[in-house]
Amino acid sequence: DQQVKQNSPSLSVQEGRISILNCDYTNSMFDYFLWYKKYPAEGPTFLISISSIKDKNEDGRFTVFLNKSAKHLSLHIVPSQPGDSAVYFCAASGTSYDKVIFGPGTSLSVIP
Amino acid sequence: DAEITQSPRHKITETGRQVTLACHQTWNHNNMFWYRQDLGHGLRLIHYSYGVQDTNKGEVSDGYSVSRSNTEDLPLTLESAASSQTSVYFCASSETRAGETQYFGPGTRLLVL
């Protein structure tokens, strides 16, 4: 049973619009969440993270929102650019958890 | 610049053969991880190490082994390759145990015939 879920395998967005990628988790022990971005034939790279003591973290065009009661987080990309086209992995961990659990990923396509 | 490298980048082997995938990092990180990436499953943890001589099993460790004799390297061995082990393998390292940023290698694409 997947502890970190990304229910949309793919998403297509027009350039300049907002991209919203969603992630749900089941384990209430998770208290730290990360988003990684992956281009074809490359390894994933860290994008942004959020601790459970916050409900929002922003870095340039990227904002992550956390709703602990719903066990849900989302990544917003505004404005979306063609270079944002990649697979995005949501990941979760915790202070009492010695591993990072990754979701299955969402493939984002930003159309020029 | 510090980096993490994997070799080979592509490998074709036959069922039953032993295969070793190399991972080398120059970050001087104590923590190293091996993942496999398969469609619909994302990244699944195979084995991990928190330091020299330390190794631990992840969620999909059957058929794989690792050893850690120094800080820089964590080779992954498939003892008897199976077609189900066809996948893309990623090595990663991090400065702290869990929850912190992991730095990934470029991946090894393995095909078992």
Image (cartoon, coloured by chain):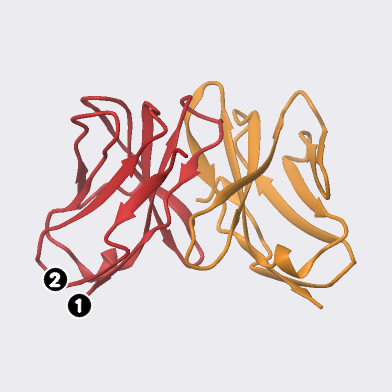
Chain colours: A orange, B red
Q: Secondary structure at mark 1?
A: loop
The answer to which of B94 and B36 lies nearer the viewer is B94
Q: Residue at x 81, y 55 (%)?
A: A77
Where is residue A66? Give x, y as percent.
Answer: 78, 38
In the rendered image, the quadrant that contains the C terminus of chain A is bottom right
Residue under label 2, please give it: B15
Where is residue A32? Give x, y as percent.
Answer: 64, 31
Residue A58 relative to residue B84: left or right: right
The correct choice, above or below, for B101 with respect to A1 in the image is above
Which quadrant of the structure image shows residue A22? bottom right
Write down the chain letter for disc 1. B
**Structural distance between the alpha carbons of marks 2 and 1:** 6 Å
Q: Residue at x 81, y 58 (%)?
A: A20
Q: Residue at x 75, y 44 (%)?
A: A73
Residue B17 relative to residue A56: left or right: left
Q: Residues within 10 Å of mark 2 (few under 14, many from 20)?
A: some
Which quadrant of the structure image shows residue B28? top left
Residue under label 1, please give it: B113
- Total of numbered circles in the picture? 2
The answer to which of B53 and A84 lies nearer the viewer is A84
- At label 1, the amino acid type is Leu
Residue closest to the far front = B1
- At label 2, the amino acid type is Thr
Where is residue B38? Give x, y as percent.
Answer: 43, 64
The answer to which of A7 and B7 lies nearer the viewer is B7
Discs 2, 1 touching: Cβ within 8 Å: yes
Q: Residue at x 42, y 33 (%)?
A: B27
